[in-house]
Image (tube, coloured by chain):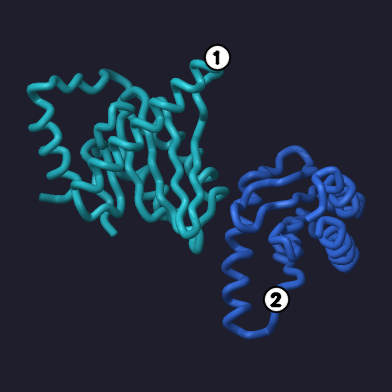
Chain colours: A blue, B cyan
Amino acid sequence: MTAPAAYGPALDLVTRVRGVRGAMLVSGEDGIVVAEQLMEGIKGGAVAALAASLAARLRRAIDAAGVGPTLFWHLQCDKGGLLVVPTPSGVLIVAVAEPDVNVGLVRLELLRAAEAVG
Amino acid sequence: MTTRAVEAWTLEPLVKFVKEAGARLVLVMTSAGQVMAQHGFSRAVDVMSAAALGAAIIASTDEIARQLSQPPFAALNHQGQRHGIFLGSVITGRGKLVVLAVYDLDTSSLGLVQLFFEQLTGDLQAASPKEGVSKQVLAADFERELSDSLNTLFGR
């Protein structure tokens, strides 16, 4: 995994996309925030814990389905969405976005951030 | 798994915490190790040991913090291979309470336990009786108090 100094630039890749309200690196195993760049009002700790819990359950479902490892998931909600890319080291790159965000672009930047984090 | 409380006001917050954090075992006790509520324990001897050890750990960490001229540590987590052990304290109308939670790493995480522990502290503070501190347990009453508490906690 890359040194913590690279975490800021990795999150910058995601947060510079218009409509992204924040991005976080979350320890997938613990559900704890490793690094974050969030707009005011987003409860980083809560999002991290619940996203990691959801990721663990999704991973089990996907394992059971036998369709290979998760590359990207997008949880679309009324007033926005949650977009997540897991890295091989177990860190999750999480983006909190507005409803009209360009999902394709966020996905691309999340994948690039995941590559940078390792 | 059963959840039981010696003091009824602790029951609802504890049930909610267990459900949301996915904790396997939980003890709510005073800083002296007197158990107020428990979830998941099946033997009285385990409750007594866990309460004594949990209270001792909190006392030790409080003393370390004091020696370092720091406020007491907010919480303590030990992560094993399959289980995690979380210890935290909360100030309520009944004084300082200690919460010990054991969680499976397969079904829960430190983040979840921390998140819902924050909610538990708020719920316990809101539910705790505002007047009167629980009476001191005298050495002479200790055995009887302990037996009564264990009987309540295990539904005897």
User: Whole-percent x and y of residue B147?
Assistant: 11, 38
Q: Decide which of B10, B62 is in the foreground and name it.
A: B62
- Which quadrant of the view contains residue A74? bottom right
Quarter of the image with the N terminus of chain B in it: bottom left
Residue A69 marker: 2
Determine if residue B156 is in view.
yes
What percent of the width, then of the height, locates residue A52? 62, 58
Q: Let me know if residue A100 appears in the view.
A: no
Q: Secondary structure at mark 2?
A: loop
Q: Which residue is farthest bottom?
A: A66
Picture coordinates of residue B115, whole percent (x, y): 54, 44
Are the residues tagged 2 and 1 within 8 Å (C-beta)? no
Image height check: is A77 above or below B119? below
Q: Which residue is mark 1?
A: B69
| Direction from residue A79 to residue B7 in the image, left or right | left
In this rendering, the label closer to the viewer, 2 or 1: 1
Going by the numbered disc 2, the residue's amino acid type is Pro
